[in-house]
Image (tube, grey):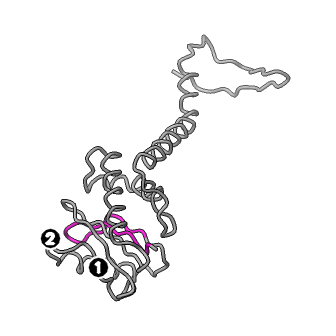
Amino acid sequence: MIKAILIFNNHGKPRLSKFYEHYTEDTEQQIIRETFHLVSKRDENVCNFLEGGMLIGGSDNKLIYRHYATLYFVFCVDSSESELGILDLIQVFVETLDKCFENVCELDLIFHVDKVHNILAEMVMGGMVLETNMNEIITQVDAQNKMEKSEAGIAGAPARAVSAVKNMNLPEMPKNINIGDISIKVPNLPSFK
């Protein structure tokens, strides 16, 4: 099971942290610091997994990571997970981010954290891997984006209605509006123009 997913830059600043077990906020911050210190001091030519730190469960857990440019992608997992499977999952996650953001960089993770969490939620939920097919993940993320845009259209409807009324070029303000059996008296309003 995946215990946590952490992304931080070369200076240890967290860019994403997702914990699948409950920890206090202070403990989470200590885990992030300890994980950064364990991972950042390792040479580039050593393997990409090591025993977890004392805060994340010690030798029963593993830290599996990849270092891309200025970012470390770290998955904290228990002993039931395959190291190579998690390395592959990290690769799929990074490639999916790269496709969604067209050459992903650290700023994308900062300014689009909600989208990054949506992508991650398509892949991992509750510490369990849901999907590893990048095309399926992108399809679901695109559907989510399409739905968000359509909802934004609904939210903007009142403003568009006001614009439409302003552009109607009415010769004078109506005194009453009749809709079927309903008659609405329009209050005296200043000119729309």
Q: Quick one: SS at disc 1?
A: helix
The residue that mark 1 highlights is: 33
Q: Which mark is residue 160?
A: none
> 93 left or right of 70?
right
Disc 2 crowd rating (10 Å Cα; few below 14, some 14-19, many 20+) is few
The residue that mark 2 highlights is: 44
Q: Quick one: SS at disc 2?
A: loop
Please report the residue visible at 78 percent of the width from the left and 20 percent of the height from the top: 178
Position of 16 relative to 176 (above/below): below
Residue 169, located in which quarter of the rendered image?
top right
Q: Using the numbered discs, state the Cα–Cα distance from disc 2 to disc 1 in whole angstroms.
A: 20 Å
Tell which of 165 and 186 is nearer to you.
165
Residue stretch rendered in magenta on the structure: 2-18
Mark closest to the chain's N terminus, 2 or 1: 1
Under mark 2, the amino acid is Glu
Tell which of 148 and 73 is nearer to you.
73
Disc 1 crowd rating (10 Å Cα; few below 14, some 14-19, many 20+) is some
Please report the residue visible at 48 percent of the width from the left and 77 percent of the height from the top: 21
Tell which of 31 and 127 is nearer to you.
127
* SS majority, magenta: strand
